[in-house]
Image: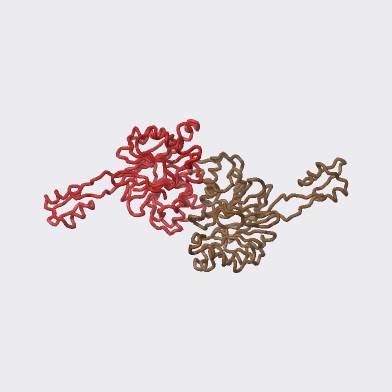
Chain colours: A red, B brown
């Protein structure tokens, strides 16, 4: 499971950071998902190994433009490339209205089916063969969600002792049991895969949150989660100066939450465009990092555009090279 | 008068070229106009000296997404920067609908007045203190326009011989005449500025065309024009292979027209995303250049992203440094 940050700036792009977009790869070669789609997301993708042709679904946390204005261009570019595979769009309803207006007023059409799923429906749940996805309501100026991605269809291991004890010999039945099927044996007995296989590891589970000024809302969802990706728009000092209206989190707020919840890996992103990464700049992104580090004792990461992270089957989370 | 190309790719962006956008500077320090606004135009502007705070008007040639999808982000970013000066948007009516849908469905609002002007109205004409603008209908899949920008309020020179012959002495009256005012003199006579000043040079006049498969439509508008900026999406060979449906021009078509019309300076842009500038690439942009050069004998330029051109008061057109 791999994450590529396509944008880490809040509100407006900077010279070195785009507005929000995150690619999540899982479930097959080149098989990926997009969470949020600020303007210029399709441009950022040109610098990664992700193609809109293999994109499985788009998840939009909330309707603000820095999370949505890249959708018309990304979708029509996929169409110009000749995509025919259906594409899921999991989003609040106004996003559908926006896209329809963009397509309808630009003489565009899509060469593929866009399957809209209302992310704000009660009991929202989405899944495909690789992932199941639930949503947690957050606190922001507009309705906003965190998405919880849980790995599905983990590989099964045969319980050989039991197979042999019950006289089920090695052969095609073993393969089908391992794939998760129940099997009727030649002698008429039913062999249930749950009886003869086991899943030897925990599923990978990550939370990708949208804009939010109450990280605690994620507490219940954090059970069994290895990674939380959350906004930290300002330091606490800047947040106090800006006031509560924007409804964003400070680094300290997110760090306190993650420490209390026992989150093993925390990735901060969505930094105010005032923060810069180059060493001489003021304010420097290091201010956000040191504020969070003073509180949170897990593995802390500050996302940069094109930074990649991997969450292995061993549940170890690692930053990999920049693109 | 200065031109900065913000995007030169047709349809979809490439790694090195954005979709269409052109900044035209004229009429004051930092005073500028935008022609077309593909996705990512606000990102490109971050690498120029142009600020959305000093943008006077936006002109949209037609409704296609590669000319319009950057508008919601550019406008809301101007708002986040606190712009209050009204901004003119000269565009086809569906562009207004698109922007209203983008703003309304993203919980956005603008901190300034957006003054919409229908570019397709009969007898369209727009002006401010620096430029007058007319439109020429083109031939494309959707209604499309070329905009003709003509310099206004050229500096006046005093006709000293005549002032002295008529006994009008140097003083504040001379200054007001030079600014273009008629003046009542102390002795009660009316001195008309047209009698005592002259404009010593021709106005700068340029055509910026949208997508178009019939360059000849611009013939009548070319009188007194120093520069034509026109799309050349393909070479003739590729155009023949693609067929007439996209309704774009080949380099040969535009070159034939410009040669026949006696256009002194021709800038080609809006190249299919298949064309590349790096020396080893195929197809190389040089194919478009050599096709046009074989026909057109004026000054030919192939626009690159961030290329700048200056049209001086002496009507000399020059490529300046890349940004």
Relative height, residue B260 to residue B117 (above, below): below
Residue at left offset 47%, top offset 33%: A239
Horizontally, is A104 left or right of B209 in the view? left
- Front residue of B129/A303: it is A303
- Front residue of B9/B69: it is B9
Residue at left offset 44%, top offset 57%: A79
Relative height, residue B213 to residue A9 (above, below): below
Horizontally, is B143 left or right of A159 in the view? right
Residue at left offset 31%, top offset 50%: A130
Q: Where is residue A284 in the image (x, y as percent from the top left)?
A: 48, 38
Looking at the rendered structure, the number of numbered marks drawn on it comes to 0
Q: Where is residue B238 in the image (x, y as percent from the top left)?
A: 51, 67
Horizontally, is B310 left or right of A32 in the view? right
- Front residue of A232/A15: it is A15
Q: Where is residue B275 in the image (x, y as percent from the top left)?
A: 50, 61
Q: Is residue A145 visible?
A: no
Q: Position of residue A131 (x, y in %)?
A: 32, 47
- Front residue of A20/B220: it is A20
Relative height, residue B253 to residue A286 (above, below): below
Q: Can residue B189 be seen in this view?
A: yes
């Amino acid at each position: 499971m791999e994450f590529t940050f396509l944008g880490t700036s809040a509100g407006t792009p900077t010279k070195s950071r785009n507005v929000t977009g995150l690619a999540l790869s899982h479930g097959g070669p080149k098989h990926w998902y997009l969470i949020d789609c600020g303007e210029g997301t399709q441009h950022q993708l040109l610098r990664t190994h992700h193609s809109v042709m293999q994109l499985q679904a788009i998840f939009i946390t909330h309707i603000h433009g820095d999370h949505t204005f890249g959708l018309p261009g990304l979708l029509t570019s996929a169409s110009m490339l000749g995509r025919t595979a259906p594409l899921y769009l999991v989003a609040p309803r106004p996003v559908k209205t926006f896209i329809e207006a963009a397509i309808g007023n630009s003489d565009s059409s899509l060469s593929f089916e866009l399957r809209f799923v209302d992310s704000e429906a009660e009991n929202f749940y989405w899944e495909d063969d690789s992932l199941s996805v639930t949503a947690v309501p957050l606190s922001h100026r507009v309705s906003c969600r965190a998405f919880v991605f849980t790995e599905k269809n983990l590989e099964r291991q045969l319980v050989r002792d039991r197979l042999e004890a019950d006289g089920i010999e090695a052969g095609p039945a073993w393969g089908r049991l391992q794939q998760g099927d129940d099997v009727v044996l030649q002698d008429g007995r039913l062999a249930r895969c749950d009886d003869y296989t086991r899943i030897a590891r925990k599923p990978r589970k990550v939370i990708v949150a949208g804009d939010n000024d109450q990280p605690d809302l994620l507490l219940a969802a954090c059970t069994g989660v290895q990674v939380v990706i959350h906004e930290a728009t300002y330091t606490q000092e800047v947040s106090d100066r800006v006031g509560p209206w924007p409804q964003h989190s400070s680094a300290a707020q997110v760090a306190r939450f993650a420490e209390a919840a026992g989150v093993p890996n925390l990735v901060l992103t969505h930094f105010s465009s005032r923060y810069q990464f180059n060493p001489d700049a003021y304010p420097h992104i290091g201010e956000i990092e040191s504020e969070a580090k003073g509180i949170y004792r897990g593995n802390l990461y500050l996302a940069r555009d094109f930074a990649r992270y991997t969450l292995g089957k061993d549940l170890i989370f690692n930053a990999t090279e920049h693109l």
